[in-house]
Amino acid sequence: MDIKDYFNSDKITDVRFFDFDNIIFDDRTRDWCKENLCSKYSTCWTCPPGAGSLDVIKGNLKQYDSAVLFSVAGHVNSREDIDSALKIGRKSRDMLINIRDKMLSDGLNVTALGGGACDICVKCTYPDLPCRYPEKAVMPIEACGINVMDTAVKLGMKTDNGENTITYFAMILWSR
């Protein structure tokens, strides 16, 4: 199967395939996590500080030959329409997990990075016990120190999909 076939979906707004060297790492991105706007900082294994150091994360990601960044956009009624925004985010996360799982079942070495913290467990075991589902956990792109907006712009992706829309980005890295 051609890699591009995994991403043939009318639900995907934009998609770009690229090499690892095109990812823009920015330490300030990880620093934003400390502001704890999502209330996940220091609460789970996929977010800082539980996610590990940026050097270790970057080293782990470097093992992959190729990457893809894709977006899923959807309509919200207003900036305050949190329910619609969360629904679009869930759709993006579900697509990411489904694509990752298909690629894994086809024998590819894959890791998936999404928007927002992992939400597999109602309560994460962090910091007392190891992650229950390390093979299923999805680390936020930002927790990896990746500036997703700058990377998207560098790749020529559409980052503004119009008034009353929200756009979520997801990344998959793989090697054969």
Image (spheres, rainbow, N blue to C red):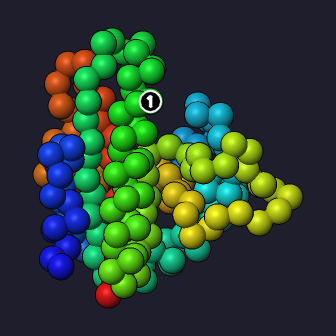
From the viewer's perspective, is residue 17 above or below residue 124? Answer: below
Q: Going by the picture, which residue comes out furthest to the bottom?
A: 176
Q: Nearer the viewer, residue 60 or 34?
A: 60
Residue that extends furthest to the right in the rendered view of this protein: 128
Q: Which residue is mark 1?
A: 86
Q: Residue at x 42, y 58 (%)?
A: 97
Residue 100 visible? The answer is yes
In this rendering, the answer to whether 12 lies above or below 62 is above
Q: Position of residue 148 (x, y in %)?
A: 35, 50
Q: Residues within 10 Å of mark 1 (few under 14, many from 20)?
A: few
| Quarter of the C terminus within the rendering | bottom left
In the rendered image, which quarter is residue 7 located in? bottom left
Left or right: 150 as drawn, with respect to 82: left
Residue 64 appears in which quarter of the rendering?
bottom left
Examine the rendered structure and indicate whether residue 3 appears above or below residue 168.
below
Measured as percent of width and height from the top left, residue 84 is found at 38, 23
Left or right, 28 with reference to 11? right
**Quadrant of image for the N terminus:** bottom left
- Where residue 122 appears, as percent x and y from the top left, is 69, 43
Taking depth in this image into account, of 34 and 69 the one nearest to the observer is 69
The type of residue carrying mark 1 is: Leu
Q: Residue at x 73, y 50 (%)?
A: 124
* Above or below 34: residue 110: below
Image spot of residue 33 (x, y percent): 58, 43
Say which residue appears at 36% left-offset and 33% top-offset. 88
